[in-house]
């Protein structure tokens, strides 16, 4: 390869130019993103069930769905949450599951379930979950001269369509916008007036018969009263005996006149009673209560607000569409809708306006969204999965600019922009890459003291980077934090192969060979060594294919990019470097290195002493390794370090039961305090919130805040965050501000989390309380939750089926009656007026105060078999008890559980606190049927750490195998492998000195060290073996090899170290996440490079007692005899 390159340098140069051109084109076509494109096999199924409590949702929807889907191929785990009115089932599949075909299977099984559900259960909504569902941008919008109502209408009619049409935007969700609705409120006053009018008209029909009766009574009244007085006088006359009185009365009552008057009077009274009964019966028949219920009105309104194609008719070859009905165009039309025609004289058909008030209202009192304390409207943008985050964010910002120009006074205030994070992080990593390359070049020049070889070596960096970018483009890797970190980490190593080649060319040229011959021979002689060293570095990342889950998704891009860059640097070292050297180095002369010569003299004394005191050296190395391991492990583990960003988020949680006005007042006070913190520029606040995926449900007791920091502030972001939390610490609510890019929370949930499993709800709740009490007693835990804080008080009505049936009732009838009376409003579709659409809400102003006493005294109306009506008290057929019900029932793998959790106090480590919690829980006597399972951040850390350890062990085995192939020896590679624990010692010391804990990112640094640090040992041991084969004694060969190879070892190590130094300092925003890799690598390289030149000679001296014999070519000849 080198011979061809020297013979045809123009071919090589053209190839290099082609790589650069393709690299530039590839780079311009690649879109930046925050994280690698993660193929996460998750599915979520949401199903609504209006009016159902959590237990009902669980039994009717969640449990049957789990049973139906549990047998799907590739199901790894399944969880569900059954809350009031809805069910959510979450399924995680094995990594290689074909999600497209699996989705079809899920839909088929759900279709089978729907047939068994009642009509109230909604159609399940299925979605695939991935990180792309996170909002890409949150912005506030305001317009000069408009209040919130006007702004909301302007947003709905003018802006939303233009924002939703932005390329790559999937949806735009609004918060704080005022929406209007049509209210149809039944008026008890109007209903009573209607009844009075109906009764008055009915009474007119009975007036004439009643007058006839009254006239007859008036005519008979004198005679009736005369007879009554006569009989009374007889009774009052004391002079008459009883017999005389009785005889006198008989004489009067037997008279024809008396009989005639009394008979007529009785007939009139019977007629009056019959007439009054008829009037009562007529009044009773006019019962509009059933007609004027919310359900009936909703049905009538829905049926009248109807328009639908009925089909087609043909005439003369022309096809006509037959459309039936017209939708209601305005709320005034609702007033004129006829409800019933009573067919009564004098009574017109009853209209909606006769019994209800129809008006438009808005939700201005039910929303909360503010910018710096002023009312505003929030916009949340989600992107389509196939588009890059930065690209979509930039398109949205461009649309903001165009709309601001189109409409005077329109202003958008961006509160959260993932595109900014990406720009910051990628800018930081790119800066680290460029500074690292610059430092590497400076070190090369200081060592080589000649601009020409430095320039040749320098060329390997950009060409290798462009080569890697081309390979990234064709393998589908985006420009994300992980892939660019791979390039930044590799930049210091890109010159290693070129340095080895250049130095060997220099060495041969100093012996008098021509530049051309030196270039060809120099590259050829070291080609095997640099191929082996490159393979050892790359091989440590190959085991990532055996790692599952998050670690593989995160680090594959980094591993591939680093591998691409190193392969490119190897090709460049064997082609471009000799081609350039053959021409540029014709007149080059070796430079003197007086300072380095003096350094060699000092090193010679140290290694000589070390060879005489090998036990001391080796014991000291082991002690340092043990001490560093002990110190680092004592600090605990974390998943990933958080990144400082110029944007913060905060959550405010009020006590359950707090009124909306109390929540708004508390938020206003918190915003006021946050604004007073130095360095805060803008604070946006809105009720409810969104989770990591942007799917959170609104709440009247929680507020989400976005805090924008002043770019010109000199304060540390961590200090600002701390002051914000301290300023709000005395508020009577739960408040926490943190960086938006809190990776631990995004990836697995922060803190200590224990799932308490069991099917007995009472025992489950009791155990959860007891476990929470244990957590509170462990040092380092705060904000302990028993998972039941949001439980609701409940009235449990246990209907006695026998008693109910004796009264003519079933449990279902009791439920239907109570449910209907507890409903205070009902939505009945919507109407469209102009460009506006209004929901129609039916309610009544005669709502009874719904209290527990109302239920205890509740009376049901029962119609018997004979049509007679009676009333039954609920307490006669049911037992009413107070209870506490879960606001949601959670299940994992078809078993109920309650999640007990605790946050970690500042200054404590989550893995160490979790360890203490596990010890405390070991002494707890877990009840039968109950299981405890630790999850959360500790589980995420342990799984990822196990993956990284597996990756490291497999990498070490591959490195050893490559070295065996190179050395053709089992012993020499074994000696070189001892550089790995030396590197680990340095890496751990680096973490201890800088205050970092061991994280998944730092573990990647240790994995990388396994492949890098052995290269120094390979160079040293290989040269010792060469000298011994040439007849040099073992001790002299060890010392000579150390002195001779120290310079290239230091050159390659220092260039790699300085290539990482900017990343290790982490001074730029967003650099903190990748700091641990750089710190571990630098610490490991510094320590291991220094001790490799001391410890490896000692080990080599101890393990190689026999003399080496050079194998002659004749010894390899195979005889035919």
Image (cartoon, rainbow, N blue to C red):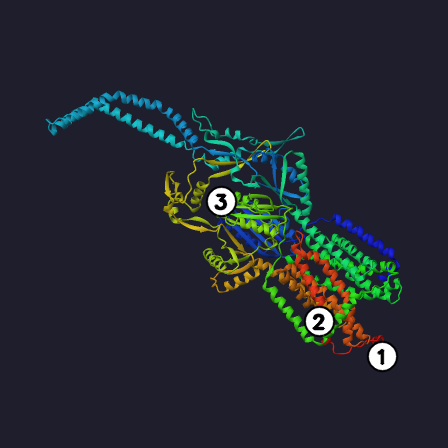
Q: Earlier in the sequence, mark 2 or mark 1?
A: 2
Q: What residue sits right under mark 2 in the picture?
A: 1095
Q: Position of residue 130 (x, y in %)?
A: 63, 51
Q: CA distance from mark 2 to mark 1?
A: 48 Å
Q: Can you tell which mark lies on residue 255?
A: none
In the image, is 647 to the left or to the right of 431? left
Q: Name the N-terminal-most of marks 1 and 3.
A: 3
Q: Nearer the viewer, mark 3 or mark 2?
A: 2
Q: Is residue 1040 above or below residue 289?
A: below
Q: Where is residue 889 drawn, in percent x and y?
A: 50, 52
At mark 3, the secondary structure is loop
Q: Residues within 10 Å of mark 3 (few under 14, many from 20)?
A: some
N-term mark: 3 or 2:
3
Rendered-image quadrant of the C terminus: bottom right
Q: Position of residue 58 (x, y in %)?
A: 51, 51
Question: Which quarter of the image is occupied by the N terminus?
Answer: bottom right
Q: Is residue 77 visible?
A: yes
Label 3, on which residue?
A: 51
Q: What whole-number distance in Å separates the C-alpha atoms at marks 1 and 3? A: 96 Å
Horizontal side, residue 505 vs residue 736: left or right: right
**In the image shown, does 489 or 185 lie closer to the viewer?**
489
Camera-side residue of 556 and 865: 556
Question: Can residue 547 be spotted in the picture?
Answer: no
Q: Secondary structure at mark 1?
A: loop
Residue hosting label 1? 1121
Closer to us: 981 or 30: 981
Q: How many marks?
A: 3
Measured as percent of width and height from the top left, residue 104 is found at 63, 50
Name above or below for residue 503 compared with residue 153: below
- Whether residues under marks 1 and 3 lie with C-beta atoms below 8 angstroms apart, the answer is no
Q: CA distance from mark 3 to mark 2?
A: 75 Å
Q: Residues within 10 Å of mark 2 (few under 14, many from 20)?
A: many
């Amino acid at each position: 390869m080198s011979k061809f390159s020297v013979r045809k340098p123009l071919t090589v140069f053209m190839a290099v130019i082609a790589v650069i051109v393709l690299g530039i084109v590839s780079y311009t076509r690649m879109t930046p993103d925050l994280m690698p494109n993660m193929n996460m096999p998750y599915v979520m199924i949401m199903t609504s069930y209006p009016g159902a409590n959590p237990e009902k949702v669980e039994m009717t929807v969640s449990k049957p769905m789990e049973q139906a889907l549990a047998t799907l191929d590739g199901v790894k785990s399944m969880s569900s949450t059954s809350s009031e009115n809805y069910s959510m089932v979450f399924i995680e599949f094995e990594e290689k599951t074909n999600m497209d075909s699996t989705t079809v299977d899920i839909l088929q099984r759900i279709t089978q379930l729907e047939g068994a559900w009642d009509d109230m259960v909604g159609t399940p909504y299925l979605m695939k979950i991935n990180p792309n569902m996170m909002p890409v941008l949150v912005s506030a919008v305001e317009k000069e001269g408009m209040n919130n109502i006007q702004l909301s209408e302007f947003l709905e009619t003018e802006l939303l369509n233009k924002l939703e049409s932005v390329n790559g935007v999937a949806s735009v969700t609004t918060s704080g916008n005022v929406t209007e609705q049509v209210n149809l409120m039944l008026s008890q006053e109007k209903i009573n007036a209607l009844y009075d009018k109906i009764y008055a008209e009915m009474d007119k029909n009975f007036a004439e018969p009643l007058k006839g009766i009254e006239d007859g009574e008036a005519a008979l009244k004198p005679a009736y009263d005369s007879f009554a007085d006569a009989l009374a006088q007889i009774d009052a006359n004391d002079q008459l005996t009883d017999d005389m009185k009785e005889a006198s009365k008989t004489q009067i009552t037997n008279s024809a006149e008396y009989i005639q008057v009394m008979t007529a009077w009785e007939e009139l009274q019977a007629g009056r009673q019959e007439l009054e009964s008829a009037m009562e019966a007529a009044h009773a028949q006019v019962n509009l209560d059933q007609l004027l219920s919310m359900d009936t009105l909703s049905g009538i309104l829905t049926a009248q607000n109807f328009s639908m194609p009925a089909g087609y008719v043909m005439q003369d070859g022309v096809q006509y569409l037959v459309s039936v009905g017209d939708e209601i165009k305005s709320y005034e039309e609702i007033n004129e809708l006829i409800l019933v025609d009573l067919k009564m004289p004098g009574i017109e058909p009853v209209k909606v306006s006769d019994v209800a008030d129809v008006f438009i209202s808005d939700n201005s009192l039910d929303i909360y969204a503010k910018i710096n304390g002023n009312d505003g409207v929030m916009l949340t943008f989600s992107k389509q999965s196939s588009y890059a985050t930065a690209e979509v964010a930039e398109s949205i910002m461009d649309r903001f600019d165009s709309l601001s120009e189109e409409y005077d006074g329109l202003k958008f205030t961006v509160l959260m922009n993932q595109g900014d994070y990406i720009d910051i992080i990628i800018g930081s990593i790119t800066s680290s890459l460029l500074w690292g390359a610059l430092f590497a070049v400076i070190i090369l020049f200081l060592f080589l003291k000649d601009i020409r070889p430095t320039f040749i070596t320098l060329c390997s960096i950009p060409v290798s980077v462009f080569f890697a970018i081309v390979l990234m483009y064709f393998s589908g890797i985006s420009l994300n934090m992980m892939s660019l970190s791979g390039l930044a980490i590799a930049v210091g190593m890109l010159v290693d192969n070129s340095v080895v080649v250049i130095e060997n060319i220099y060495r041969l040229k100093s012996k008098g060979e021509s530049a051309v011959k030196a270039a060809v021979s120099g590259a050829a002689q070291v080609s095997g060594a640099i191929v082996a060293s490159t393979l050892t570095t790359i091989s440590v990342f190959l085991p990532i294919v055996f790692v599952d889950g998050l670690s593989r998704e995160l680090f594959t891009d980094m591993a591939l990019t680093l591998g691409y860059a190193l392969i490119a640097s190897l090709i460049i070292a064997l082609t471009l470097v000799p081609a350039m050297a053959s021409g540029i180095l014709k007149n080059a002369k070796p430079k003197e290195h007086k300072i380095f010569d003096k350094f060699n003299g000092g090193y010679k004394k140290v290694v000589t002493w070390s060879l005489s005191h090998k036990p001391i050296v080796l014991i000291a190395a082991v002690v340092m390794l043990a001490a560093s391991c002990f110190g680092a492990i004592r600090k605990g583990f974390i998943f990933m370090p958080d990144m400082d960003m110029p944007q913060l988020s905060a959550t405010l949680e009020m006590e359950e039961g707090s009124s909306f006005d109390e929540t708004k007042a508390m938020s206003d006070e918190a915003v006021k305090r946050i604004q007073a913190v130095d360095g805060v520029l803008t604070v946006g606040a809105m009720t409810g919130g969104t989770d990591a995926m942007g799917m959170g449900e609104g709440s009247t007791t929680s507020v989400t805040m976005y805090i924008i920091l002043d770019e010109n502030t000199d304060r540390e972001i961590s200090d600002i965050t701390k002051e914000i939390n301290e300023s709000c610490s005395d508020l009577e609510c739960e408040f926490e501000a943190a960086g938006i890019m809190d990776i631990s929370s995004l990836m697995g949930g922060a803190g200590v989390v224990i799932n308490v499993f069991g099917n007995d709800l009472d025992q489950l709740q009791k155990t959860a309380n007891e476990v929470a009490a244990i957590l509170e007693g462990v040092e380092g835990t705060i904000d302990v939750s028993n998972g039941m804080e949001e439980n609701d008080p409940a009235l449990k009505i246990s209907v006695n089926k026998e008693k109910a049936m004796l009264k003519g009732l079933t449990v279902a009838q009791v439920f239907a009656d109570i449910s209907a009376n507890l409903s205070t409003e009902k939505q009945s579709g919507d109407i469209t007026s102009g460009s506006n659409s209004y929901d129609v809400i039916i309610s009544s102003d005669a709502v009874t105060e719904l209290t527990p006493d109302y239920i205890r005294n509740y009376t049901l109306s029962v119609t018997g078999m004979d049509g007679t009506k009676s009333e039954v008290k609920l307490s006669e057929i049911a037992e009413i008890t107070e209870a506490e019900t879960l606001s949601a029932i959670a299940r994992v793998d078809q078993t109920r559980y309650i999640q007990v959790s605790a946050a970690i106090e500042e200054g404590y480590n989550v893995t160490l606190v979790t360890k203490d919690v596990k010890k405390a829980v070991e002494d707890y006597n877990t009840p039968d049927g109950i299981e405890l399972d630790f999850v959360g951040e500790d589980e995420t850390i342990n799984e990822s750490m196990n993956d990284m350890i597996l990756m490291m062990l497999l990498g070490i085995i591959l490195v050893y195998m490559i070295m065996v192939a190179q050395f053709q020896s089992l012993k020499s590679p074994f000696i070189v492998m001892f550089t790995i624990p030396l590197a680990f010692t340095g890496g751990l010391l680096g973490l201890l000195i800088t205050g970092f804990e061991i994280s998944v990112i730092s573990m990647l640094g240790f994995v990388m060290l396994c492949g890098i640090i052995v290269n120094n040992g390979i160079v040293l041991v290989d040269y010792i073996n060469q000298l011994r084969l040439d007849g040099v004694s073992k001790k002299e060969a060890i010392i000579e090899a150390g002195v001779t190879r120290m310079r290239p070892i230091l050159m390659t190590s220092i260039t790699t170290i300085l290539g990482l130094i900017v990343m290790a300092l982490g001074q730029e925003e967003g650099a903190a996440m990748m700091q641990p890799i750089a710190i571990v690598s630098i610490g490991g390289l510094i320590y291991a490079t220094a001790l490799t030149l001391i410890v490896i000679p000692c080990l080599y001296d101890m393990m190689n007692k026999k003399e080496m014999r050079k194998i002659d070519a004749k010894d390899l000849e195979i005889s035919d005899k």
